Amino acid sequence: MTKTLYPITVLGAGSWGTALAIQLCRAGGPVTLWGHEPELMADIDTARCNERYLPGIPLPESLHLSADLSTALAGVQDVLVVVPSHAFRAVLDQLRDVLDGETRLAWATKGLESGSGKLLHEVAGEVLGEAVPMAVVSGPTFAREVAEGLPTAVTVASNDEGFAADLAARLHSSTFRAYTSHDVPGVEVGGAVKNVLAIAAGIADGLGYGANARTALITRGLAEMMRLGEVLGGQRETFMGLAGLGDLVLTCTDDQSRNRRLGLALGRGQRLEEALAAIDQVVEGVQTAREVRELALSRGVDMPITEQVYAVLYEARKPKKAVKALLDRHQKPELS
């Protein structure tokens, strides 16, 4: 069966947006990559490589580049937004005036809206209306590995089964597999909370606490993710899949993760500002820790690891004291 190779536009020319654009080209069909910085997009087009975010990875000749939003969206039904969570609403605000009634919107952004703590499908519904077909792409992915064509699997979640199936097919190639789901809130919670937990795992490793501590943090972190996710409408099974446990393990254990690298730096005694400057890209877990903590407090969800990550990031708590606070908690049944 031949899949339909319809055009698609990717909004966001960072590492992940560029990697997904490359993958969509690899899978076939016309692809446009839009970025808001004209000079950067011109440099990428000239070099045929995004040297700032994915150095050394050549762009396919079939990938078109644009810094003009109207041009990038011309003749396109499906749009994939891949920008940091703090910019998500602003990009949708720009889209509102240029999209037509046939457009379908997807995003591969992971996180919560800054200030409100809203899940991104809630933001999209507010800005564009509930009638627009929407989907979220998430799972255990590092941009460079996807760009290099290494084997990868993701989840595409949507309340519109047809859109989920179309987008999964559009992403599919010999090295990239996409599974479908209808659990949008569960997939979104998994993609957001795992970044906070990766900071915790990095802190533990930076302190030299070993594999036992790292594994305990991952396992108990998964329990926190599931508690919050179910309260927010997610399904328990989702958190045992690619967008939950899969993404959590990846982000907590590999140094390609910016969130884990931040935790490592903090555990080794580096100041937050210095660590962020050294990474020099958005570390989603910093903002998300604040939003997840507020959500947990407002919903009465027990999230002790998240609470301690927040304290390290925003209350200047020493990492060793944060770990001690976790170890000093009262004993309880594991599955309570």
Image: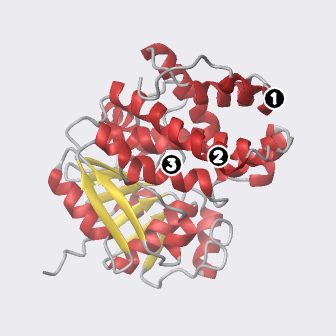
The residue beneath circle 2 is: 212
Q: Secondary structure at mark 1?
A: loop
Q: Amino acid at mark 3?
A: Leu
Viewport quadrant of the C terminus: top left
> Residue 14 occupies which quadrant of the picture?
bottom right
Mark 3 sits on what residue? 248
For the question of whether residue 173 can be seen, the reply is yes
The number of numbered discs placed on residues in the rendered structure image is: 3
How many angstroms separate mark 1 from mark 2 (CA)? 21 Å
What residue sits right under mark 1 in the picture?
A: 318
Q: Quadrant of residue 26?
A: bottom left
Q: Name the image quarter holding the N terminus.
A: bottom left
Q: Is residue 74 left or right of residue 37?
A: left
Nearest the eye: 214 or 16: 214
The location of residue 96, given as percent across then percent down, is: 35, 42
Q: Earlier in the sequence, mark 3 or mark 2?
A: 2
Q: Residue furthest bottom?
A: 61
Coordinates of residue 295 in the picture (x, y in percent)? 48, 22
Query: Camera-side residue: 208 or 92?
Result: 208
Task: Provide the secondary structure element on which disc 2 rests.
Answer: helix
Look at 50% across and 48% down and name the residue there: 248
Identify the amino acid type marked 2.
Asn
